[in-house]
Image: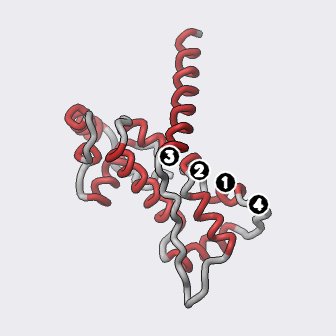
Amino acid sequence: TAPRERESRDFMTKTLFFSIISTLLPQNTATPSPVQDGKPLPFWMSQLLTQMHYPPHFRYSQQELLQVLPAFQYNISYVSRMFRHYMGVTFTEYRNKIRFDTAHSLLQTTNLSIEDIIVYVGLNSRTYFYREFKKRYGLSPNRVGHPDAAENEQEFGELAAEEYPGNAENI
Protein backbone atom coordinates (compact mmCIF):
# COMPACT_ATOMS: atom_id res chain seq x y z
CA THR A 1 0.00 0.00 0.00
CA ALA A 2 2.94 2.38 0.49
CA PRO A 3 3.59 2.79 -3.27
CA ARG A 4 -0.12 3.43 -3.89
CA GLU A 5 -0.24 5.99 -1.12
CA ARG A 6 2.84 7.68 -2.58
CA GLU A 7 1.28 7.73 -6.07
CA SER A 8 -1.92 9.18 -4.68
CA ARG A 9 -0.01 11.81 -2.71
CA ASP A 10 2.07 12.68 -5.81
CA PHE A 11 -1.08 13.00 -7.90
CA MET A 12 -2.73 15.27 -5.32
CA THR A 13 0.42 17.39 -5.09
CA LYS A 14 0.59 17.83 -8.88
CA THR A 15 -3.12 18.66 -9.03
CA LEU A 16 -2.70 21.31 -6.34
CA PHE A 17 0.43 22.63 -8.07
CA PHE A 18 -1.37 22.98 -11.41
CA SER A 19 -4.28 24.74 -9.69
CA ILE A 20 -1.87 27.25 -8.16
CA ILE A 21 -0.05 27.72 -11.47
CA SER A 22 -3.39 28.35 -13.18
CA THR A 23 -4.14 31.23 -10.84
CA LEU A 24 -0.65 32.76 -10.82
CA LEU A 25 0.37 32.65 -14.48
CA PRO A 26 -1.04 35.06 -17.00
CA GLN A 27 -3.52 33.01 -18.99
CA ASN A 28 -4.71 33.14 -22.56
CA THR A 29 -7.96 34.59 -21.29
CA ALA A 30 -8.35 37.15 -24.02
CA THR A 31 -10.92 35.40 -26.11
CA PRO A 32 -11.34 36.70 -29.62
CA SER A 33 -14.47 38.54 -30.55
CA PRO A 34 -14.88 37.65 -34.20
CA VAL A 35 -17.71 39.13 -36.13
CA GLN A 36 -19.58 37.29 -38.85
CA ASP A 37 -21.30 39.51 -41.43
CA GLY A 38 -21.13 42.47 -39.06
CA LYS A 39 -22.82 40.63 -36.18
CA PRO A 40 -21.09 39.96 -32.85
CA LEU A 41 -20.83 36.46 -31.44
CA PRO A 42 -23.89 35.03 -29.72
CA PHE A 43 -23.64 35.21 -25.93
CA TRP A 44 -23.43 31.41 -25.56
CA MET A 45 -20.45 31.35 -27.97
CA SER A 46 -18.63 34.00 -25.93
CA GLN A 47 -19.25 31.94 -22.80
CA LEU A 48 -17.99 28.79 -24.50
CA LEU A 49 -14.80 30.53 -25.67
CA THR A 50 -14.17 31.85 -22.16
CA GLN A 51 -14.53 28.36 -20.70
CA MET A 52 -12.22 26.91 -23.36
CA HIS A 53 -9.45 29.29 -22.25
CA TYR A 54 -9.73 28.22 -18.59
CA PRO A 55 -6.84 25.74 -17.97
CA PRO A 56 -8.75 23.25 -15.81
CA HIS A 57 -11.12 22.79 -18.77
CA PHE A 58 -8.37 21.90 -21.27
CA ARG A 59 -9.17 18.20 -20.78
CA TYR A 60 -12.93 18.63 -21.26
CA SER A 61 -14.67 17.27 -24.32
CA GLN A 62 -17.00 19.55 -26.25
CA GLN A 63 -19.99 17.99 -24.49
CA GLU A 64 -18.41 18.49 -21.05
CA LEU A 65 -17.65 22.13 -21.83
CA LEU A 66 -21.23 22.73 -22.90
CA GLN A 67 -22.44 21.30 -19.59
CA VAL A 68 -20.39 23.93 -17.75
CA LEU A 69 -22.42 26.70 -19.37
CA PRO A 70 -25.51 27.66 -17.40
CA ALA A 71 -28.86 26.78 -18.99
CA PHE A 72 -27.29 25.63 -22.22
CA GLN A 73 -29.82 23.85 -24.40
CA TYR A 74 -28.39 23.53 -27.91
CA ASN A 75 -27.46 20.15 -29.36
CA ILE A 76 -23.84 19.38 -30.11
CA SER A 77 -24.31 19.23 -33.91
CA TYR A 78 -25.72 22.75 -33.94
CA VAL A 79 -22.90 24.00 -31.71
CA SER A 80 -20.28 22.40 -33.95
CA ARG A 81 -21.75 24.00 -37.08
CA MET A 82 -22.06 27.41 -35.44
CA PHE A 83 -18.58 27.18 -33.95
CA ARG A 84 -17.08 26.62 -37.37
CA HIS A 85 -19.31 29.30 -38.88
CA TYR A 86 -18.23 31.97 -36.38
CA MET A 87 -14.64 30.91 -35.69
CA GLY A 88 -13.61 29.60 -39.11
CA VAL A 89 -12.13 26.44 -37.56
CA THR A 90 -13.53 23.37 -35.84
CA PHE A 91 -13.92 23.12 -32.08
CA THR A 92 -11.01 20.65 -31.93
CA GLU A 93 -8.71 22.84 -34.02
CA TYR A 94 -9.44 25.83 -31.82
CA ARG A 95 -8.99 23.88 -28.59
CA ASN A 96 -5.67 22.45 -29.78
CA LYS A 97 -4.48 25.95 -30.70
CA ILE A 98 -5.21 27.07 -27.13
CA ARG A 99 -3.43 24.01 -25.75
CA PHE A 100 -0.30 24.45 -27.85
CA ASP A 101 -0.15 28.22 -27.37
CA THR A 102 -0.34 27.63 -23.61
CA ALA A 103 2.35 24.94 -23.79
CA HIS A 104 4.59 27.25 -25.82
CA SER A 105 4.09 30.04 -23.27
CA LEU A 106 4.80 27.72 -20.33
CA LEU A 107 7.98 26.46 -22.00
CA GLN A 108 9.18 30.04 -22.36
CA THR A 109 8.19 31.32 -18.93
CA THR A 110 8.48 28.45 -16.45
CA ASN A 111 10.76 25.62 -15.44
CA LEU A 112 7.98 23.04 -15.64
CA SER A 113 9.06 19.77 -17.21
CA ILE A 114 7.74 18.98 -20.65
CA GLU A 115 5.89 16.00 -19.15
CA ASP A 116 4.09 18.28 -16.68
CA ILE A 117 3.22 20.74 -19.44
CA ILE A 118 1.77 17.94 -21.55
CA VAL A 119 -0.47 16.93 -18.64
CA TYR A 120 -1.34 20.56 -17.86
CA VAL A 121 -2.60 21.27 -21.38
CA GLY A 122 -4.73 18.14 -21.38
CA LEU A 123 -2.89 15.83 -23.76
CA ASN A 124 -2.10 12.16 -23.24
CA SER A 125 0.56 11.39 -25.83
CA ARG A 126 4.08 12.71 -25.70
CA THR A 127 4.69 11.64 -29.30
CA TYR A 128 1.65 13.60 -30.50
CA PHE A 129 2.72 16.63 -28.47
CA TYR A 130 6.24 16.69 -29.92
CA ARG A 131 5.09 16.10 -33.51
CA GLU A 132 2.30 18.68 -33.39
CA PHE A 133 4.43 21.24 -31.53
CA LYS A 134 7.16 20.98 -34.16
CA LYS A 135 4.58 21.28 -36.95
CA ARG A 136 3.05 24.41 -35.38
CA TYR A 137 6.20 26.24 -34.27
CA GLY A 138 8.90 24.81 -36.53
CA LEU A 139 11.03 23.54 -33.66
CA SER A 140 11.04 20.91 -30.95
CA PRO A 141 9.60 21.89 -27.55
CA ASN A 142 13.10 21.23 -26.22
CA ARG A 143 14.39 24.18 -28.21
CA VAL A 144 12.04 26.73 -26.64
CA GLY A 145 14.22 28.01 -23.80
CA HIS A 146 13.61 24.99 -21.61
CA PRO A 147 16.35 24.05 -19.10
CA ASP A 148 16.28 20.26 -19.57
CA ALA A 149 16.50 20.36 -23.38
CA ALA A 150 19.40 17.98 -24.07
CA GLU A 151 18.22 15.09 -21.94
CA ASN A 152 14.60 15.37 -23.14
CA GLU A 153 15.67 15.47 -26.80
CA GLN A 154 17.66 12.25 -26.47
CA GLU A 155 14.97 10.56 -24.38
CA PHE A 156 12.26 11.53 -26.89
CA GLY A 157 14.30 10.26 -29.84
CA GLU A 158 14.39 6.83 -28.21
CA LEU A 159 10.70 7.00 -27.30
CA ALA A 160 9.60 8.02 -30.81
CA ALA A 161 11.46 5.11 -32.34
CA GLU A 162 9.51 2.71 -30.11
CA GLU A 163 6.02 4.22 -30.40
CA TYR A 164 3.63 3.97 -33.32
CA PRO A 165 3.25 7.48 -34.74
CA GLY A 166 -0.35 7.02 -35.90
CA ASN A 167 -2.13 8.56 -32.90
CA ALA A 168 -2.49 12.01 -34.44
CA GLU A 169 -5.75 13.16 -32.85
CA ASN A 170 -5.29 12.80 -29.11
CA ILE A 171 -8.32 14.36 -27.53
Q: Secondary structure at mark 2?
A: helix
Question: Between disc 4 and disc 1, whose residue precedes?
Answer: 1
Residue that badge 3 annotates: 122
Q: Which mark is in front, 4 or 1?
A: 4
Nearer to us: label 3 or label 4? 4
Mark 2 neighbour class, 10 Å CA radius: few under 14, some 14 to 19, many 20 or more: some
> Residue at the bottom extreme?
37
Q: CA distance from mark 4 to mark 2?
A: 15 Å
> Comparing marks 3 and 2, which lies closer to the viewer?
2
Question: Disc 2 designates what residue?
Answer: 57
Q: Which mark is residue 151?
A: none
Mark 3 is on which residue type?
Gly
- In the rendered image, the vertical position of residue 65 relative to residue 75, given as above or below: above
How far apart are labels 3 and 4 at the CA level? 23 Å
Badge 2 amino acid: His
Q: Using the numbered discs, state the Cα–Cα distance from disc 2 to disc 1 in whole angstroms.
A: 9 Å
Residue 90: horizontal and vertical position, in percent? 51, 69
Q: Residues within 10 Å of mark 4 (few under 14, many from 20)?
A: few
Q: Quadrant of residue 46?
A: bottom right
The numbered mark at residue 64 is 1
Element under label 3? loop
Q: Which residue is mark 4?
A: 70
Amino acid type indicated by mark 1: Glu
